[in-house]
Amino acid sequence: MRVACLGGGPAGLYFAISLKLRQPEAEVVVLERNKPDDTFGWGVVLSDETLDNLHQNDAKSAEAIRAHFAYWDDIAVHYRGEKVVSTGHGFCGIGRKQLLLLLQERARELGVELRFETEVESASAYAKDFDLVVACDGLNSKTRTEFADTFKPDIEPRACKFVWLGTHQKFDDAFTFIFEETNKGWVWAHAYQFDDDTATFIVETDEATWEAYGFGEMNQEENIAVCEEIFRDHLDGNSLMSNAKHIRGSAWLNFPRVLCEKWYHENIVLMGDASATAHFSIGSGTKLAVESAIALAEYLTTKPSMEAAFEAYQDERRLEVLRLQSAARNSLEWFEEVHRYLHLDPVQFNYSLLTRSQRISHENLRLRDAAWLEGAEKWFQTRAGGPESPVRSPMFAPYRLREMALKNRIVVSPMAQYKAVDGCPTDWHLVHLGERAKGGAGLVYTEMTCVSPEGRITPGCPGLYAPEHEAAWRRVVDFVHGETDAKICCQIGHSGRKGSTQLGWEEMDAPLAEGNWETMSASAIAWSDRNAVPREMTREDMDRVRDEFVAAAEMAERAGFDMIELHAAHGYLISSFISPVSNVRQDEYGGSLENRLRYPLEVFEAMRAVWPEGKPMAVRISANDWVGDDGVTPEEAVEIAKAFHAAGADIIDVSAGQTSTQAKPVYGRMFQTPFSDRIRNETGIATMAVGNIYEADHANSILMAGRADLVCLARPHLADPYWTLHAGAAIGDRHAAWPLPYEPGRDQLWRLSDREAEAVRV
């Protein structure tokens, strides 16, 4: 087989090596436009895992590479005059030039032909003369452009500006992040050693600061001089250097996120940055390249045809790329939005930075550096008003809203039960909510409790519109207060156009088989083609419903609830006014966001007026309609939160979606937390995070990083009413109060948890 590798970077060279190891008879040619010792990067970072993969594939080149590595375990963050160091991270770096020279030497040894200073204008010509063409022609791949109709590349330029520099200043003790505030804005650097004498020094900033400095109008020497001045306190008199003299102008770039839909065309296949990129802040570009090279070489050797090899290669590597790009997106977005976090204490800022990609979690940090994490947890506990000892995880820190003191940060989220009778809660609700209050959570929510019979979602939904409802709820509240130290919140709402539907386990959101009632909404738009068109609310309707919300709030107070929440999310009545997908009114309640918020704020303010001053009140919002600019966007959600906070809301319960059947949500772990993070850190308003949070690790990471103040779990509490107590036992917490009759079970659980932990350590 005759093979041409277009590009002599790590991807092309390592593929040539990998194929020759498997097929020594193959004729492999690597074509590279530059000279053998040219390079326009500084250092690359690889993980221990990638090194192990290299060793398994080719022990000889792996050992040569390993011999030239600079190793470090620490990450140092310089921020607001403080240096915070954590350890156990396990990085290694090597100069890009050194890596290329080692791979070139190994390739020649195996019989690979290397042709330097060879410009490849078109892959088509080589595809005629070679059996296989591997296009490793980089970020600006000509091959990808030539066959764009087939490869269908998605190229997304990201927001920050960066320039890749080097320095002889030593950063050999840690991977170092430096954040400097200047009179033109914040500028930061990613620095790491890659040989005895040289370190990579990537300078990054936002577009506004870049423009304020005029970097785009400077030549490279002028740019370097300004960067040296910005970071002079960290360079110890050493200069910064560029090896991008071939680039005209300043050499600043915007990182492009690249992902191709298809990775091969006839006998041409993409590899490395030509097929996909991962942001430098997680250091995975070279990892992707060399691991893709191994995979393609293996499949070409083991699959029955080239087509089958390409399919297997694309399926495996594209999935891995998507995983890494997800982490890389989280990481690069953290840097793009770093201004959100520049108010944080250095401890919390460092934690937020370390966990930005979601690949490092709370307990993973404990494995890396238990002493540092314990110090961070102590900082969080004492800042929350807790004792210095014992040191507990963030989920067990106290929290206060007005006069309501919570023992911890875990919330049992509202979960519809569909077990009410004529709007009245039953023994089911007593047991359901009572068990979860006994289970250790700091705050327990009722499901949406409706303000009128017509405001129910289903015939099985509870209400607060009749004296018997108030009495039944008081029974539940009295049990929670009498037998537990949890607090209880009543979520109050109106179904709007999503009402008059079947029970949840029958057919969700489908009309009743019989006995449907008339619904109303902000506009006469049906929830779906199957649902009845609601009546557009008149001002008379709005007055009546507002008064029903007020009456429900008064009943909630008499029933003894510690807190109430206005449900203004998920497409129900109040939400239908806020979202433009359901509000097309032409009067003063439609159109602009200010108008769309007019009635929801009126309802909230009326409820707040009758709700006791010492008791808190929350609002649940949908922070993203998931329909793009046609609906509520995360940017608009910030303004929605501000409006409710100004009206007296103490905390925003940040959910998303369920406002339109056209929504296209992006699911994943903690997938709605970024909306809470944005609101909290752009406005300073307290938030609750919800959505696919199911581990103590999730809760602790969210809280410690300052992404929310409370963490809500729904489905985990359906499966396990005692989730909080069990989660605490699993992470070694022995300080939660259990119901006295259950202490023998607690003791057994602790013993079993300790044995399991010891077995893992052994």
Image: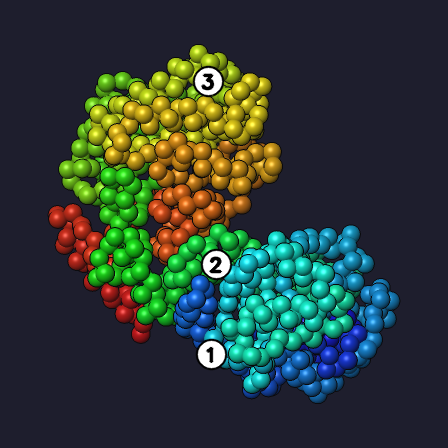
Q: Nearer the viewer, mark 3 or mark 2?
A: 2
| As drawn, 465 above or below 475 | above
Q: Nearer the viewer, residue 169 or 493?
A: 169
Query: As shown in the figure, which amino acid type bears the numbered disc 3?
Result: Thr
Name the disc covering residue 173, or none. 1
Identify which residue is drawn at 50% across, 59% down: 357
Residue 349, picture quadrant:
bottom left
Q: Residue at x 76, y 60 (%)?
A: 144
**Residue at x 76%, y 72% (from the top left corner):** 246
Q: As drawn, is 275 to the left or to the right of 283?
A: right
* Of the two numbered discs 2 and 1 in the rendering, the one whose residue sits closer to the viewer: 1
Lateral position of residue 724 relative to residue 676, left or right: left
Q: Left or right? Give the position of 104 relative to 573.
A: right
- Does residue 714 appear to the left or right of 282 in the view shown? left
Q: Mark 3 near mark 1, Cβ–Cβ under 8 Å?
A: no
Q: Residue furthest front?
A: 183
- Marks 3/1: CA–CA distance: 66 Å
The first of marks 2 and 1 along the sequence is 1
For the C terminus, the quadrant is bottom left
Using the image, tell me which numbered label, if any, was put on residue 356. Answer: 2
Amino acid type, callout 2? Arg
Number of other residues with Cα within 10 Å of mark 1, as a class: few under 14, some 14 to 19, many 20 or more: some
Amino acid of disc 1: Asp
Q: Mark 3 points at which residue?
A: 519
For mark 3, give the secondary structure: loop
Q: Compared to 209, does 197 lie above or below?
A: below
Task: Name the element at disc 2.
Answer: loop
Q: Residue at x 35, y 17 (%)?
A: 547
Of the pair 614 and 519, the residue shown nearer to us = 614
